[in-house]
Image (cartoon, helix red, strand yellow):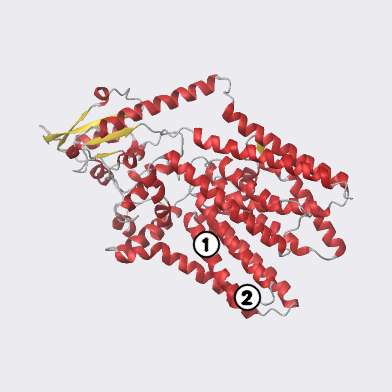
Amino acid sequence: MDHGAAPHRQWLGLLAVTWLLILVGIGLRVWNAPSSVGSYDIDIDTFFFLGWKLTQGSLLYTDHFDSKWPIVQYLFVPSALLGSIRSHRVLVVLLNAATAVVLARSVGSLRRSGWIAAAHGYPLPWVAAALYLLLSQKLVGGLSGHIHHYANSFLVFGLACLSREVARRADLQAPPRAARGWLVAAGFWFFLAAAVRPNLIAPLLLTTLACQLWRFASGRRRGLSTGALLMECMAMVGGGLLGALLVFAPYAFVPDGPARAWAGAVEVLLEWSGQAMQDQGTMLHFLRQMSVVGIAGIEVWILMILPLLGIAGWVRRANRHGSGGRLLLLPALATLYLVGLALSFEHTHYWGHYDLMSVLPYTLLIVSGIGLLTAQQRQARSQAWSEAIVLVLSLILAYNIVSAELLTPSPTGQNSRKQAASARLAGEWSLVRNHLAAQPPEQRGFISPQDFSLHWQLHQDASTVGSHPSWSLEPYGLTASWATRRLGLAITDAQACDQLVAAENHTIVWKATDRGGRHSESFLKKCLASRTSQWTEITARVGLSGEIYKLFERHPGPRQAPPDQPMPVRQRSSTSAMERI
């Protein structure tokens, strides 16, 4: 009779109930979260706008520009059709849940193939699924439904293809061509992930190279030829080319499409990345930053304690017995992936929501480490201690997540000021939206260069080529080039002014920001004064305070006394890397 079976079943039951509470808390958080402007990342407004533009037949780089590849526009079409931030959040949660199930099946497949260890009866696949869903929703940017969710899903789909390839190789009767087919599929999904978030290129290349080197070293002992490894690499490259064809094929059917796609997806981004950037930190700084990020009151490094103990113990065991080393490959690749991610931040830029790109490697690192720990525990006492620690951490997470949704926090001075500011912003935004929506069809055109939420909410086009506040009027101080001219970006003051006062605009919505330069009110007034059309400020008439939004309305007929002086030429301002989105 196994005396440890009953306590283990009780632990499994308590753990299941605890994680069910965590999932309920996440659901309540998504449903109860405010969806007014300012309650989510401003990037989402740009993605919604671009998704809506695609439903109108306009591809990215043809009428509008953002520093993303076209796949982001494709992915946001469903959210744009649903038409609300809440529905987008629900859609992303469903995507996270479906991806978590795929990840669970992949972990189970790798476990059966002997690449992940775990004690018998330990629900490691579902631990991976729950942990993936928790990290996806609780890291910064998770609630906004940022594009990293899609990139992570594509990474998991690629991992699922690799796990199927590994399972087929374990089956001696499986044909080799079928295995290469799964490699093609993996390359396809990995390319889509990198197309959503180019920061993933470095970690994907590092882990692929390390994995192939390991296969080369271990395969020589089994007679694996260099040609076979080369064919595997070519299969994944072929899958990536299929992904590129999917992303860029629509541009072949658009006038000047290939040139615009090259200008927007390659040339402008290279010119932007070639600018001198402010030093934000080293690779070690970003690794530390990713390790101290908080998840419902618990930092990631705390969740890593038990897995690291399991990995360290297995390293000693492998050195002592000379076997079992391949079980360390997955945690080693996950660690290398995090290093590659930190390297990409060092050479580009970093925002808090970029931590979402660490969801999959952290999940695999924690799961593989816990599996190694449970596989080494031969004594009931040591197993009970590790199970107790896992349960306590889970209970802390459950309490912090559920209590935040069910209990009303006591108001503090800072929270009260923040809530008052959010309510004021939402109120003034509603006044602006209602005023614009009430205009007759011939006067409904407007431009809101600092707030694109109004454009996608009202299904109204924007006259600025840049579709993000960072690109609308002052695209990072770029100089004129073939690419910027091809896309029509506002490089000079005169070009920015022309896009502001375009003939289709009856109203200019000006939102106060700290960007300065062409986003300052002084630039707007100089622009309006230099044009023959007559513009009048209607901020007070609409009921706005003027501290957040200001409205300017065009009147028919020319100005009575147009000024003689042209738009002043302003020196190009430098833009710090921290302003980059």
Q: Is residue 41 left or right of residue 510?
A: right
Q: Say whether residue 483 is left or right of residue 397.
A: left
- Residue 97 place in picture, x, y as percent: 56, 48
| Element assignment for label 1 | helix
Q: Residue at x 49, y 33 (%)?
A: 33
- Please say if 163 is above or below 514: below
Q: Which residue is mark 2?
A: 229
For marks 1 and 2, give the CA distance: 20 Å
Crowd around label 2: few <14 · some 14–19 · many ≥20 (10 Å): some
Q: Where in the figure is residue 277, as x and y percent of width and height?
A: 48, 48
Residue corresponding to mark 1: 189
Q: Position of residue 351 (x, y in %)?
A: 52, 43
Q: Nearer the viewer, residue 58 or 568?
A: 58
- Observer-nearest residue: 131 or 46? 131
- Which residue is depicted at the point 17% across and 39% down? 442
Q: Is residue 578 visible?
A: no
